[in-house]
Image (cartoon, rainbow, N blue to C red):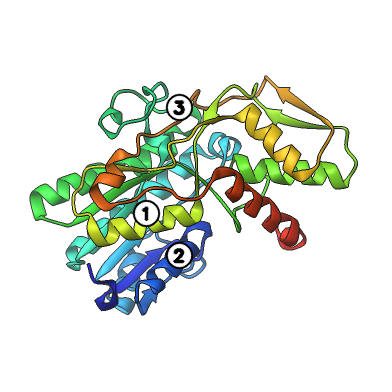
Amino acid sequence: MNLKDDKILVTGGAGFLGKFVVEKLRGEGADEIFVPRSKDHDLSLLDNIEKLFSEFSPTLVIHLAAMVGGIGANMEHPGQFFYKNLMMGAQLMEVSRLKKVKKFVALGTICAYPKFAKIPFREEDLWNGYPEETNAPYGLAKKMMLVQSEAYRKEYGFNSIFLLPVNLYGPGDNFNPDSSHVIPAMIRKFYEAKINNQKEVVLWGDGSPTREFLYVGDCAEGIVLATKNFDRSEPVNLGSGEEISIKDLAQKISSKIGFDGNIVWDRSKPNGQPRRRLDTSKAEKYFGFKSKTDFDRGLDRTVDWYIDNHENVI
């Protein structure tokens, strides 16, 4: 696609990942980009979506908006995580089809994979089991966009793609302790413990699970590359292909922060999925995406951003 010629709707475009995607799109010469704000457009409501399309008439939709959060938020609000994400995706894609949008880019989630998927996670294994229980409602709601994408291509010839990003991190992440993911949550905890001279930091689980992380700028590049160059409905992973244990991650972040107290693991809290690492070969094969940002360098940028901006972070 020549993005210069398109009117691009980016849901979630004002969010953490969305800001990087919009910047990449502008770098490709895209001039007409509309970013709806949740306070003005509740995308779980069909009337709001139809109103949005009548106002902007997009030719390309990149759907990044989601109700997201860490393990605690998913456990506390499973119904909301399921309903909001399901309705946003299903209705946006249907209205996009009816309005003859040229392409719909759907962003799924690593949480859609089975709890005990083989390592590395391959797209072919996506249906070989039930997701990890604490975030299954969210993962399954997002996964329905894959079913819809494949069904709409088969029946209507609708051009939609489905990307599966791994856990993201980077400057401008969500550091709210009630809803943040593991890296920003740890950064905030260790920093606050340091400045308050606390002797210990308590973290959930036992530290044994592993996770893969992708720098937010790299993810944005992958999304734009797929938008331009990929036109199949089969799912494609976006990741770095590297794996680190939560315990090693905690040690790494505490060291970068300069916290020298004790790390205490609360084993009464859930660990989440045991391991996560993606097979990223299809993204490189289909649209030339390979992550570029070294994890330590990306983590340094994230820590530095939080230290510089923590007084303005919720």
CB within 8 Å, label 2 to label 3: no
CB within 8 Å, label 2 to label 1: no
Image coordinates for residue 195, horizontal then vertical, percent: 86, 47
Image coordinates for residue 156, horizontal then vertical, percent: 10, 55
Q: Which residue is mark 2?
A: 13
* The N terminus lies in quadrant: bottom left
Front residue of 93/64: it is: 64
Quarter of the view holding residue 45: bottom left
Which tag, 2 or 3, sits closer to the chain's start?
2
Density class for disc 1 (Cα within 10 Å; few <14, some 14-19, many ≥20) is many
Front residue of 136/216: it is: 216
Q: Which residue is mark 3?
A: 132
* The C terminus lies in quadrant: bottom right
Instruction: Compute the Cα span from label 2 to label 3.
Output: 28 Å
Closer to the observer: label 1 or label 3? 1
Density class for disc 2 (Cα within 10 Å; few <14, some 14-19, many ≥20) is many
Instruction: Compute the Cα span from label 1 to label 3.
Output: 26 Å
Image coordinates for residue 25, horizontal then vertical, percent: 38, 69
In the image, residue 34 sits, relative to residue 82, either above or below, namely below
Q: Which kind of residue does numbered mark 2 sit on?
A: Gly
Which tag, 2 or 1, sits closer to the chain's start?
2
Residue visible at 26% across and 62% down in the picture: 228
Q: Which residue is mark 1?
A: 222
Relative placement, left or right, of 44 versus 70 is left
